[in-house]
Amino acid sequence: MGKVAVAATVVCTAAVCAAAALVVRRQMQSSGKWAKAEAILRELEDKCGAPTAKLRQVADAMTVEMHAGLASEGGSKLKMLISYVDNLPTGDETGLFYALDLGGTNFRVMRVQLGGKEGVIKQESEEVSIPPHLMVGSSHELFDFIATALAKFVATEGEDFHLPAGKQRELGFTFSFPVRQLSLASGTLIKWTKGFLIEDAVGEDVVEELTKAMERVNLDMRVAALVNDTVGTLAGGKYSNPDVIAAVILGTGSNAAYIERAHAIPKWQGLLPKTGEMVINMEWGNFRSSHLPLTEYDISLDAESLNPGEQIFEKLVSGMYLGEIVRRVLCRMVEEASFFGDTIPPKLKIPFILRTPDMSAMHHDSSSDLKVVGSKLKDILEVPNSSLKMRKMIVELCDIVTSRGARLAAAGILGILKKIGRDTLKEGDNQKSVIALDGGLFEHYTEFRNCMSSTLKELLGEVAEYIVIELANDGSGIGAALLAASHSQYIEVQES
């Protein structure tokens, strides 16, 4: 063999070896990448763990905080707000009533014609999106926008809805933010949640703000009842099912309300209501306990939120935050394990870009190649190519975050049942305890809903047979209209 041939052979061999070494190195890098990503996922799974024993501790802590919140103002992270609703709708209410439901990035206006024992004869509603700048602007601007939309809706009232001559239209106002209720139709805003931050409204009477705005647009309407969305959901649920004892919202935010015995509220100063009962708005989103399984992602999310240190429970279980937790985990997987390759997708750095409905769509993807996951990554994060292995890991990530939220929500419900003594079986008592549940997270996120239901059964054992979760779709809107009806200024006139 000539020298040239030998040299060529040596060069070729070296090139082959170099190429082989590059392949091996890339395989090792890829293997290391997946091992690191897997380690991050397993660490998350461990820290999000919510075994039965831990959930019982969370439920017990919830019950303790409920007692403390009922004992004194400021005695607990749970505000346990007195709603002044001691008389829930009976089903005898008649007439035309309006509802305004404000609790997130949209608000709903509704009118309902009630026919007594005939129930709801007719109803119409309309949803209005709130421009983002109004969520952080001034109180005047927000309420003027709402009053204008309400006036336009009233102007479309058809002949099917009948308001007797000389009577003023009455409104149930569902306001789904922490309010210190002063009476059934007045209350001052304690603080904003769910992305709102309008400082000049804090400490103001929200009914007064709305009433002034309605006057400015020449809308003649009286606010008959100010209620939280959970209180409205409870009223709506009770109207259709007398066994309803509590209501839970699992949507953009999360909260719960329940019927308490009036004598079990030490901070109640007035005369005990004739019914002996009082609806309590728990504001359970603000619950926190050392037993909650918090991760570094939750801690950083809270620190960078509009309300650091507040609404910790809500940040673990509600629709506003689940997708954001997943995004934060993906950020770490990208930075430490090059999960999406050598470059970090710029879109992944945008807080809240991954919404919970998108997360739900990926979680529910049943196609063999997880096509939905791939398209969501492409459309939202601009990741053009994703392997099946990568997609499977993302589905597992969604499952870990969702399961923790759903299991903690079930523990919260157990806490309520323990407080009112419905967590055990009493001899001869076969009464069902119905929990009215509203909110898009519960209604549309099937994996969340199923996990929460199975966890409740796991926690309650044989008692689970007597606990019913009932979807109360748009319960808060109907409930507000019903409470306006049951507290109408014309009731005494009608009765006499």
Image (tube, rainbow, N blue to C red):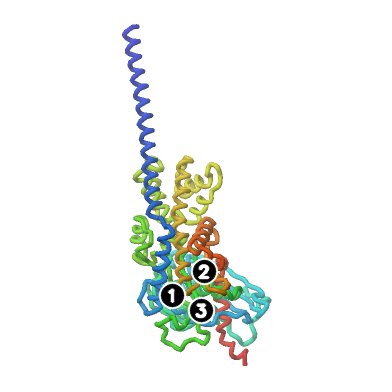
Q: Nearer the viewer, residue 428 or 152?
A: 428
Q: Marks 3 and 1, how far apart in space?
A: 11 Å
**Residue 277 percent coordinates (x, y):** 50, 82
Q: Residue at x 44, y 57 (%)?
A: 404
Q: Which mark is residue 214?
A: 3
Q: Nearer the viewer, mark 2 or mark 1?
A: 2
Q: Nearer the viewer, residue 116 or 125?
A: 116
Residue at image coords 47%, 42%: 384
Q: Is residue 58 in view from this perspective? A: yes
Q: Earlier in the sequence, mark 2 or mark 3?
A: 2
Question: How far from the left and from the top, in percent, is residue 429?
Answer: 56, 74
Asked if disc 2 and disc 3 are in contact, CB closer than 8 Å, the reply is: no
Look at mark 2 in the image and give the residue it sits on: 107
For marks 2 and 3, give the one nearer the viewer.
2
Which mark sits nearer the N-terminus, 3 or 1? 1
Q: Earlier in the sequence, mark 2 or mark 1?
A: 2
Residue 306 position in % (x across, y down): 37, 64
Crowdedness near tag 1: few (<14), some (14–19) or many (≥20) residues, C-alpha within 10 Å: some
The kind of residue on which mark 3 rests is Met
Q: Which residue is mark 1?
A: 140
Query: Which amino acid type corresponds to the residue marked 1 in the rendered image?
Result: His
Q: Quadrant of the N terminus?
A: top left
Report, in whole angstroms, how far the alpha carbon at label 2 lies from the one at label 3: 16 Å
Residue 48 figure quarter: bottom left
Q: Is residue 428 above or below residue 393?
A: below
Secondary structure beneath dot 1 equals helix
Quadrant holding the C terminus: bottom right
Query: Residue flagged by tag 2: what amino acid is it?
Result: Phe
At mark 3, the secondary structure is: helix
